[in-house]
Amino acid sequence: MNLIAGHRALEAPVGVPVWDIDPYDPDVLVDPMPYYRQLRERGEVVFLRRYGVLAVGRYDTTKAVFTDYENFVSSRGVGLEDFAVTEPWRPPSIILETDPPDHTKARRVMARALSPKVAKECARLFEEEADALVDALLEKGTFEAVTEFAEIYPTTVFPKAVGMTEVHQRYLVDYGAMVFNAIGPDNALRRAAMAHAPEIVPWIMASCARDRLTKDGLGAMIYDTADTGEITLDEAGMLVRSFLSAGVDTTVTGIGNALWCLSQNPEQWELLKSDPSLIRPAFEEVLRFTSPVHTFCRTAGRPTQISGVPVEEGTKVVCVLGAANHDPDKWGDPENFRVDRRPVGHVAFGVGIHGCVGQNIARAELQAVLSAMVRKVDRIEAIGEPVWRPNNAIRALDKLPIRLTPQ
Ligand code: OVV
């Protein structure tokens, strides 16, 4: 058995284009558009020889694989590692790395805790913090938007919403980097992120304990469902861990990428300022345009097919959401960032039963941030070259020097 990156490597299937690219090469990760385009153009499904996996990047195909949870399972891991052959680096998530029927209960509990109603109740907190942060940054004028804005905001508001009583903002960001780099191969990026594990993982696990959470946050809502017997106390702790895994790096990236899009497209910022009803569509366009989570995998749980191509049981399928969100057959002019596009159907939150359960909270955070900006900021200028931070699953900035001018 030929193991590559923790899964049984597939032999090149007959009739499938073979490609030698390493999509997890930092050079590709920081400038992925040429890779996305080639992936779409080479075929419905492509064989990545280096990893012995299939890859999809056309919109319809990517969506089809993601939607078909019965053939393309999550319980064997959503990275390159196949949990059927390799021990995962942490106990699997009981919502991300599961299939129905196990998934269904966890999803129901999380969907309740992250409902539109709950997101609305978080809005005031999110708005107060966004207003205060934007005021402080306007006072400074120039600043480093990744560390001083994108990383600060979610690590301030989200732990409050969850009800954490002890917050370590750096640990939260670094844990996100571990979780998302772990989706890729055992490369230098993943190893560098994992080097922090001995310090951070115990802190994260301790932070999920019931007695470390306030009685009125999202975390308490999860534990309350354990009291009704719907889930166990251990499961409640695991679901709080999912908040901390999926709720920080994603929104940090959403804010950074929004600032990047708006600073690079000043006429789109002008349009947004002139019509604040475009805030929500503008954020959706940021998601489509930058795909903060660029790649997730699935595993064929049984023999199946993709667009008529036979797929063996155990095959890892790399689903490139970033490529699907730039498919010209779906979007017409995908390379243009347009705040009034209203990109209904983008797959930045995934699609199907595993579609982002926290998306209401993410939207509420971005609504608060962009609304504060629209009310207070005149100009957003990049005052240096943006630098991307390579990550095996996340497309995020490393540096974005910005100047904000007040209205
Ligand atoms: C990276 C990620 C996304 C979504 C959920 C989780 C992790 C989890 O740990 O549940």
Image (cartoon, rainbow, N blue to C red):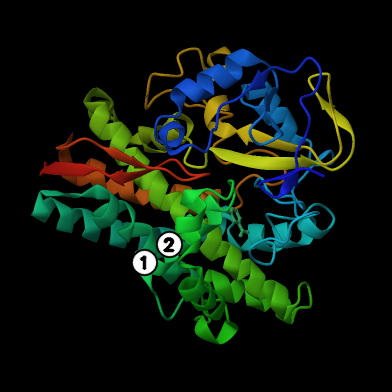
Q: Nearer the viewer, residue 85 or 171?
A: 85
Q: Amino acid at mark 2?
A: Asp
Mark 1 crowdedness (10 Å alpha carbons): few <14, some 14-19, many ≥20: few
Q: Amino acid at mark 1?
A: Arg
Q: Mark 2 — residue?
A: 174
Quarter of the image for residue 102 reads bottom right
Left of 311 or right of it: where is 372? left
Residue 310 showing in the rendered view: yes
Quadrant of image for the C terminus? top left
**In the image, is residue 158 above or below residue 8?**
below
How many numbered markers are drawn?
Answer: 2
Quadrant of image for the N terminus? top right
Residue 272 pos. (x, y %): 29, 31
Residue 64 pos. (x, y %): 73, 29
Q: Secondary structure at mark 1?
A: helix
Residue 274 showing in the rendered view: no
Does the residue tagged 1 have its C-beta within 8 Å of any atom of ligand 1?
no
Mark 2 crowdedness (10 Å alpha carbons): few <14, some 14-19, many ≥20: some
- The image's mark for residue 170 is 1
Question: Who's the residue at 58% across and 83% down the image?
Answer: 210
Quarter of the image for residue 206 reads bottom right
**In the image, is residue 157 above or below residue 297?**
below
Q: Nearer the viewer, residue 39 or 267?
A: 39
